Image (cartoon, rainbow, N blue to C red):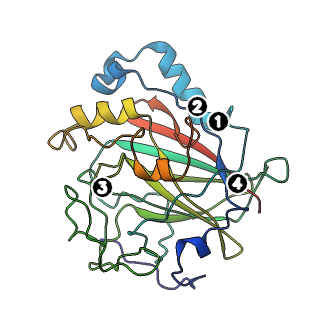
C-alpha cells in the first residue's frame, strides 16, 4: 500500500457540491466514442493490421480530432472522494484488471481552446470488484448506505487504502496521463471515472467520464477479473447521474482504441472557462 502524500497543502475544505462546482466555469467534454473490435479484446493475436496502425497513430497523438471544447453541465462529486493528494501517474497500486491508459487534456473554452498548464487533475474510481479504496466496508452489490453522509453527500472513509486514486499537474499542452484499470461496477451506477480539476486552488471541474457501453460489456463478460460478477444492469443509458446531469449524446463518453499488447488507450479533452 502506497503512503498518502500529506505534505501537500490542501486547497479547500469539503463543501456542498453546489459550492464546489462553478457551473458558469464548468467544463465540457469534447469526446467521440471509438469502439474496440470484439476480436481484439478476446484474442489480441488476431488483431487486424489496420487497428495496429490506428493504435500507433493514436498513441502518438491521443487528442487528434478532439478540438471542440464546449461548456457542459456539472456531475456530482459522489460520496467517495478523498482529498488526500497522491501525486502519481500510475494509480493501479497492485489492483488487477484490464489495463487502460487515460489521456486528459485541459483547455480554456473562453480562449480558443488554449491549453491550461499547471491545472491539478484528480482522478478516482472503483476497482474490478466495484470497491473504492477507503470504503472497503461498502458492499458494491447493494446501494450504499448514505445515512451517515455529510451535507455534501460525502461519506467518511474508514480504511487507509488509497488504490486507484491519484493526481497529476497538466503540462504546457494542458495534458495529464494516468495508468490504471477499467473500473468494475457497483449498485446503482454505470462504469465511470471521477475527475476533479483545480486551477489556482479553485475547483473548475467536478465530473464523471464513461467508456463505450459495448466495450465494458465485453470486458466484464470475458476478462477473469470481472466475469464472476458479469455485466451490470446499470448502463450509460440508464445511469441516474448522467440523467440528472442532463447529458445528451456521447459528450461524456471517452474515445478508446485497443493497443497491443492488451491495453486500452482512452482520451478526453475537458474545456473550462478558466
As drawn, the label of residue 174 is 4
SS at circle 1: loop
Q: Are marks 4 and 3 in contact (CB under 8 Å)?
A: no
| Disc 1/disc 4 C-alpha distance (Å) | 13 Å
Classify residue 164 by image quadrant.
bottom left
Of callouts 3 and 1, the N-terminal one: 1
Q: Quadrant of the C terminus?
A: bottom right
Q: Which residue is mark 2?
A: 58
Q: Earlier in the sequence, mark 1 or mark 4?
A: 1
Marks 2 and 4, how far apart at CA = 17 Å
Kindly state the secondary structure of the residue where label 2 is placed: helix
Query: Residue 146 placed where, x, y %?
Result: 31, 72
Considering depth in this image, is 167 or 52 the residue closer to the camera?
Answer: 167
Residue positioned 29% across, 58% down in the render: 94
Give the mark nearest the N terminus, 2 or 4: 2
For marks 1 and 4, give the one nearer the viewer. 4
How far apart are the alpha carbons under marks 4 and 3? 27 Å
State whether residue 193 is above or below residue 31.
below
Disc with the residue nearer the chain's start (4 vs 3): 3
Q: Which residue is mark 3?
A: 127
Q: Are marks 3 and 2 in contact (CB under 8 Å)?
A: no
Q: Quarter holding the N terminus?
A: bottom left
Say which element carries label 3: loop
Instruction: Tell which tag, 3 or 1, sits nearer the viewer.
Output: 3
The answer to whether marks 2 and 4 mark residues whose Cβ atoms lie closer than 8 Å is: no
Residue at horizontal 26 percent and vertical 65 percent from the top = 144
Where residue 124 sits in the image (x, y, percent)? 43, 61
Tell me the tag on residue 61: 1
Decide if residue 261 is in sight here: no
- Front-most of residues 254 and 176: 254
Q: Are marks 1 and 2 in contact (CB under 8 Å)?
A: yes
Amino acid at each position: 500500500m502506497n503512503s498518502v502524500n500529506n505534505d501537500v497543502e490542501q486547497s479547500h475544505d469539503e463543501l456542498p457540491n453546489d459550492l464546489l462546482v462553478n457551473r458558469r466555469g464548468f467544463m465540457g467534454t469534447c469526446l467521440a466514442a471509438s469502439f474496440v473490435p470484439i476480436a481484439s479484446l478476446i484474442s489480441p493475436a488476431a488483431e487486424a493490421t489496420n487497428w495496429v496502425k490506428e493504435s500507433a497513430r493514436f498513441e502518438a497523438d491521443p487528442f487528434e480530432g478532439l478540438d471542440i471544447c464546449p461548456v457542459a453541465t456539472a456531475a456530482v462529486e459522489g460520496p467517495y472522494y478523498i482529498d488526500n493528494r497522491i501525486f502519481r501517474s500510475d494509480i493501479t497500486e497492485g489492483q488487477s484488471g484490464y489495463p487502460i491508459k487515460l489521456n486528459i487534456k485541459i483547455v480554456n473554452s473562453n480562449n480558443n481552446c488554449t491549453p491550461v498548464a499547471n491545472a491539478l487533475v484528480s482522478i478516482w474510481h472503483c476497482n474490478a470488484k466495484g470497491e473504492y479504496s477507503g470504503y472497503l466496508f461498502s458492499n458494491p452489490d447493494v446501494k450504499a448506505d448514505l445515512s451517515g453522509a455529510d451535507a455534501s453527500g460525502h461519506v467518511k472513509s474508514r480504511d487507509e487504502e488509497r488504490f486507484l486514486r491519484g493526481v497529476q499537474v497538466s503540462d504546457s499542452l494542458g495534458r495529464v496521463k494516468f495508468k490504471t484499470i477499467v473500473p468494475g461496477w457497483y449498485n446503482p451506477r454505470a462504469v465511470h471515472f471521477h475527475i476533479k480539476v483545480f486551477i489556482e486552488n479553485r475547483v473548475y471541474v467536478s465530473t464523471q467520464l464513461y467508456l463505450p457501453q459495448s466495450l465494458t460489456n465485453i470486458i466484464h463478460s470475458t476478462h477473469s477479473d470481472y466475469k464472476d460478477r458479469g455485466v451490470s444492469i446499470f448502463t450509460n443509458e440508464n445511469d441516474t447521474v448522467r440523467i440528472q446531469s442532463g447529458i445528451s449524446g456521447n459528450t461524456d463518453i471517452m474515445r478508446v482504441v485497443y493497443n497491443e499488447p492488451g491495453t486500452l488507450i482512452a482520451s478526453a479533452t475537458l474545456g473550462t472557462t478558466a
